[in-house]
Amino acid sequence: MSELTKPDLRPANPNFSSGPCAKRPGYSLQALEDACLGRSHRSKPGKAKLADAIDRTRAVLGVPADYHIGIVPASDTGAYEMAMWTMLGARGLDILGWESFGKGWVTDAVKQLKLDDIRVMEADYGALPDLSAVDFTRDVAFTWNGTTSGVRVPDGNWISDTREGLTLCDATSAAFAMDLPWEKLDVTTYSWQKVLGGEAAHGMLILSPRAVERLESYTPPWPLPKIFRLTKSGKLIDGIFRGETINTPSMLAVEDYLDTLKWAESLGGLSGLLGRVAENMGVLSAWITGSDWAGFLCEDPANLSTTSVCLKITDPDLLAQDDAVQAAFAKRIAALLEGEGVAYDIGAYRDAPAGLRIWAGATVEAQDLAALMPWLDWAYATAKSEAKSEI
């Protein structure tokens, strides 16, 4: 086709947002008809739904039997800040940040908690900090997958088997898409609206026995609001991890999460989800290999995110322009695709370098990604044709 000819095939589902993410294939509101509505979440049916969500989570993710799983308020942010506010300060802290959300946790530790003994280990977008420099006699806080940079830790091998401190892992765009080594993780958090395409506002908090021991043996020096309290009289509040939530959850959102878990089970559980993610990443990688204008923002293929895939524009003509021109060009590509109804919400995160961000998690169909790739080329060619006077 000529460079400005629109492709014939369109994605059946144009939702490639990195959060909230695409609903599962075949999703319908009819799947929520069994929701426990109009009843107290503390009623027998309400608590049964919440407990079912916890049990299915454990089964799909393969969480060890002695780990606690709780449903908490305020999405992944609430879950991670709950862990930070209740557990940090007992030891020195190494905290890693290489994209927006991880750097947000750095801000919490440095400017809000004002921890006395803290080492901040940062890297620019596209790179990881030096993982070999992390000291596991200390607590360690990090994101598994950088949702806004497309960079993840390669595996858990860098985490010491004889660690003395706790590991606090924000896994919000990794859970259900990457194989998490539970024996290496003491606190793991995520939100429903990422890989399984659930609804927002609820977070998951997964605690190892070592994390529980910290909660029961350490009292932080700062006040804790009710919404953060995980212990009473020095003991873990077990009910939180049996479905007795701290505050009122949306039972409609709970039903939606249960629907996504049942869908995951129908695929064979985690292995089925991982297979879909790998297939999606294969489509994107093949396109990048043949592209003369785009590349992955991630510098090292071993660290490449397989969910929130961040792209940079590599056209030398564009790279010769200032940041404002590059950002405007990338936004124009995203706007053209949205205008055609073939891709929604794929602009780079507001703090990230100019580019695009395409969600490739398990709820996205590989054929939709394959249909999108020619449209990316069309949008780039159109944007460049429009900008000939500037570039």
Image (cartoon, rainbow, N blue to C red):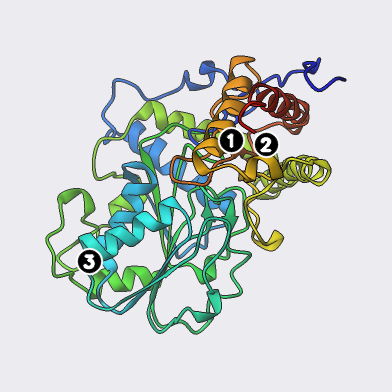
- Please give the residue where the numbered disc 2 appears in the rendered image: 266
Q: Secondary structure at mark 2?
A: helix
Q: Are marks 2 and 1 in contact (CB under 8 Å)?
A: yes
Q: Is residue 235 visible?
A: yes
Describe residue 384's horizontal placement relative to residue 146 as left or right.
Answer: right
Q: CA distance from mark 2 to mark 1?
A: 6 Å
Q: Amino acid at mark 1?
A: Lys
* Vertical side of 280 occupied by 370: above or below: above
Residue situated in front as seen by the camera: 379 or 25:
379
Dot 3 amino acid type: Lys
Residue 235, disc: 3
Question: How many neighbours does mark 1 have within 10 angstroms: few (below 14), some (14-19), or many (20 or more)?
Answer: some
**Mark 2 neighbour density, 10 Å: few (under 14) some (14–19) many (20 or more):** few
Is 362 in front, or is 377? 377
**Three-letter code, disc 2:** Ser
Q: Which residue is mark 1?
A: 262
